[in-house]
Image (cartoon, rainbow, N blue to C red):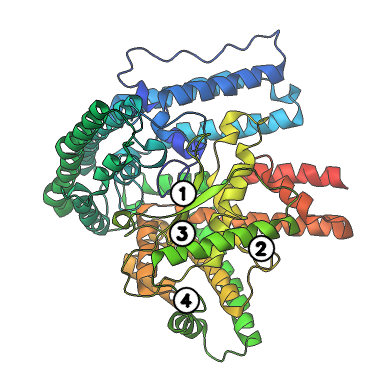
Amino acid sequence: MKRRVNYNPSMIRFLHIAAAAACAALAACGAGSAPPPPPAVAASIAPGDQLTRLVESYWDEYQRLNPAWLPQGAAVRYDRGEGWDIGAQSIADALAFERRYLAALAAVPRARLSAPAQLTYDIFKRERELAAESFTYPSELLPVNPFRSMPLEFAQTGAGQDQYAILSAKDFENWQSRADGYVRWTAEAIANLRDGLRRGYTLPRPLVAQLLPLLSRLGADTPANLFYQSLRSVPSTAPDADRRRFSDGITAGVRDKILPAYRTLHDFLRDEYLPRARQTVGLSVLPLGDAWYAFLIKRETASHQTAAELHALGLAEVERLHARVQSLLAEAGFAGNAQAFFEATLRNPRAAFDKPEDVTGYYEQLKIDAAGALPTLFEGVPQADFAIRRLDDSLGAAAPALFYRRAPNRNSAAILFVNAPAGAAQPLVPSVAAFLREALPGHHLQIATQTERAELPRFRRFGGDPGFVEGWGVYAQSLGEELGLYRDTESKFAALQAQLRCAAGLVVDTGVNSQGWSAAQALEYLRSQAAIDEAAARAAVDRDIALPGEALACAMGAHAMRALRARAEQALGPRFDIHAFHAALINDGAMPLDILDAKVGLWLNGAH
């Protein structure tokens, strides 16, 4: 099942403005004074200018208060570990922050705005409404899981790599500040987890059990611990006194602050939390669980459909894709079923490697091939590049095989992470379909395109929407044949299976979180419907348990984009231009799917 692209530095593959705003303004706790109010709306100022001032003021304040949760690609660095607070006062201040801007937006006369400004108004309003509504549900009481949470986030910034390399005294001070921030966050997380136990908001026991070995590895005081890698980033050209100060400070910070914080969290979860963690796995069993899940449906898909309706839609989509798979196998003259074909490709894959560097080399060549094919379907490509890098083995246990992290600042490239562990028991098999989804023409093309649109408000350039972003990734994956990159039955089969797993995610997520499915039921369904190995099936189900609602985004987003393309092809007939259609989809940036539908409708009216 498709997993979230990183919207902030994590395997999140995560995070859009609406979701990040659920944590927005967290640094206001302890800031000493209330943040300034948004600019007053003056009647003498044109409505368009009023709106511009408002949304840019929001972004300025958001950047100042929340560097830790700032969506990747914004023009500030994630330096000092500020904005990590998850205490009660921080949550209250964050809600007040969103409500202030909603109130100010109400004074802007939407009817007097231009069409592009109305689009900005609608997106901003939706995001602030969702952010404010999110505070109804106490996600801060469930702050850890083995797939996406601060221990993983911090592991990717505390290691002193890339833009976090310690090249100067300022870099060293920021590293120290981040270490102190993580220690504070750990204490708050433990306090919140205890409060959750008291109030009936507890994590499923299997998730806690999975998290323990990860925390154990990250907290182990060994030379191989990734946090000691910060020592390697200190430049050899630095003065001897600075090098000694940085080296001694890093060693002490890792040994005396970071590693003890990981061990403290590990021991708390093992000794106090795990015995009281719940046996159930779905969100619906928690207080407000059904309402919480209905909110997640709305946030992830921009849909007001019920969980039951989405479940039925997922079942139908799985059947549609099954028919396509069977047709493909029949064309190839394969007599067995999909699982048999899948197992045959594992026994004799066309591309398999023993060394991780060979896998990254395969993707480097695929990057060249994909870039050369893009003009077939796209009228322009972004200037921004992305690097391809192997994921540290200590972080790979719960990570996807391939995932994209957008550029953290103007001076850094985006990264496509390859999870190819050294010494793997089985050959490492790269995936063309996963590359198309994560990189070109998927997440990198879409995110870099909107980031380079300097005329867009910053909250649109650097934000996102889960249904749009994840839907675009799966839609992009379906373009492989048109781009000439699915060159054999195996690659076409893998692409269809990826889409099928996304559709099955709609069934599993709703089944687990709304219909009372057990983990075993979800696993059995996924095994029966998708050609998948046991480890991947378990990981997919565990992610749906850990991140309720997230699996809905890719299926609903892809469904919406396919429907829009069919609508445009029917409406325009021979005048349909795929280059213009793709530009109409992505050039204005990610947005809620219902707003996208209205925008494309306006484009179609203009294209007639």
Do residues under tags 2 and 1 come within 8 Å of each other at their CB atoms?
A: no
Q: Position of residue 169 (x, y in %)?
A: 32, 25
Measured in 3D between alpha carbons, the distance from the residue under mark 2 to the one under mark 1, in whole angstroms, is 21 Å
Do residues under tags 2 and 3 come within 8 Å of each other at their CB atoms?
A: no
Which residue does the numbered mark 3 point to in the structure image?
402
- 358 lies above or below 234: below
Q: Where is residue 495 in the image (x, y as percent from the top left)?
A: 57, 69
Q: Residue 479 carries which label?
A: 2
- Crowding around mark 2 (Cα neighbors within 10 Å: few <14, some 14 to 19, many 20+) is some
Measured in 3D between alpha carbons, the distance from the residue under mark 2 to the one under mark 4, in whole angstroms, is 21 Å
- Pick whichever, 316 or 586, lies toward us: 586
Which residue does the numbered mark 1 point to in the structure image?
13
- Pick whichever, 546 or 386, lies toward us: 386
Q: Where is residue 186 in the image (x, y as percent from the top left)?
A: 23, 37
Do residues under tags 2 and 4 come within 8 Å of each other at their CB atoms?
A: no
Q: Which mark is residue 549?
A: none
- Pick whichever, 564 or 356, lies toward us: 356
Q: Is mark 4 on a helix, strand or loop?
A: loop
Decide if residue 270 is on the left or right side of residue 124.
left
The mark lying in front, picked from 1 and 4, is: 1
Which residue does the numbered mark 4 point to in the structure image?
531
Instruction: Specify which label sits upstream in the sequence, 4 or 3.
Output: 3
Instruction: Specify which label sits upstream in the sequence, 2 or 4.
Output: 2
Q: Residue 391: which quarter of the image?
A: bottom left
Q: What type is the residue that disc 2 sits on?
A: Leu
